[in-house]
Image (cartoon, grey):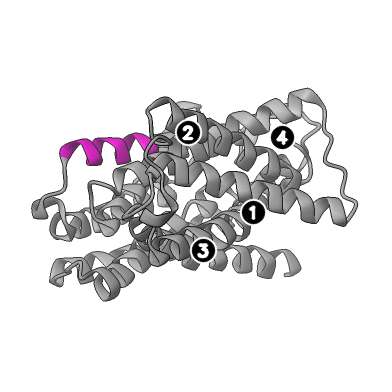
Amino acid sequence: MARGWRIWTALGLVYVVWGSTYLAIKVSVETMPPLLSAGLRFTVAGLLLGSILALRRTPLRVPWREARAALIIGVMLLASGVGAVTLAETRIDSSVAAMIAGSVPLQVILWRTLSRERVATATKLAAVVGIGGLALIIGPAGISGGSAAIGLAIMLCGSVAWSTGSFISRGMPLPKDPFVATVYEMIGGGLVLIVAALAVGEGADVSADAISAASFAAWAYLAIFGSLVAFTAYAWLLHHAPISQVVTHQYVNPIVAIVLGSVFLGESQDLATVVGALIVIGAVFATIRSESRSAPVTLSVEVDKAAPPMRAR
């Protein structure tokens, strides 16, 4: 029961905070360069978390193989995943970006199937139904309203990077302390984004006077809540919950993003969006119920990092 309420608390943080980050990203890139702002966001968050752990006397030094694994995951999830979201939102609506990110659960189930894991039929069906609901939302959510094809392609690539990173993280020798792992992941992913930003010339035209107060406030929110709080919760979940349960946030985040996009950015929804949202909510509960039946074995496999990689049941 104790583990259960901790998992639900962490999931709640990821559901709400990451749902709101699509809006915050859209506001931040209005006057801030996308790759550079994302890189600074994660680097600052990683340094803050590292400082907090140091004050608590948590050892930050880990074996090179663990540091390397964390850096790889940071590049996959943050530099390639969230970096792509930030870049894509310079071209597409925040709600559309959230809808494309909603395909991650289906991608993870595909990876599990290809790796010959046993995936419950109910999990597969729930994922397909959930993606079907997201398809109802995507149509009227902004694609027909001038979203650039290149932005959609970037966003799709970002979602693939996120699902792949989430899946392979289970078999990698990450630091046993998920918070220490998060420090390496955020700093590693952030530095890669900063290098990429400078390589494409984003740093040449940066001016403090050109950055609006709204964009800076959104960036600060992303750094503290979107990165430090929510990503730390996500890293903890990857160590303590079944992967298909963890990625159910991809069902809920789009709903939060649609509501906030509608209220603050004027992004419109129609009846199809409402129906799709109801389908998505149903899929979330169906997926969690299906995965919870096999959770005890899955959890024992994922917590035992000293054992060889095993297939979750």
Question: In the picture, residue 139 is in which quadrant?
Answer: bottom left
Give yes or no for contact between labels 1 and 3 (Cβ–Cβ under 8 Å).
no
The residues colored magenta run 149-159
Corner quadrant of residue 1: bottom right
| Image vertical order of residue 74 relative to residue 102, above or below | above
Residue 196: percent from left, percent from top? 45, 29
> Please, is residue 38 above or below residue 22 in the view?
above
Q: Amino acid at mark 2?
A: Thr
Relative depth, front residue between 232 and 125 = 232
Q: Which mark is residue 174?
A: 4
- Distance between the Cα atoms at labels 1 and 3? 15 Å
Query: Could you tell me how far apart the alpha carbons at marks 2 and 4 are, in whole angstroms?
Result: 16 Å
Q: CA distance from mark 4 to mark 1?
A: 14 Å
Q: Gap in Å between the C-alphas at discs 1 and 2?
A: 19 Å
Q: Is residue 156 above or below residue 179?
A: above
User: Who is closer to the viewer here, 218 or 202?
Assistant: 202
Residue type at the position of mark 3: Tyr
Residue 232 marker? 1
- Spot occupied by residue 171 in the image (x, y as percentages of width and height): 65, 30
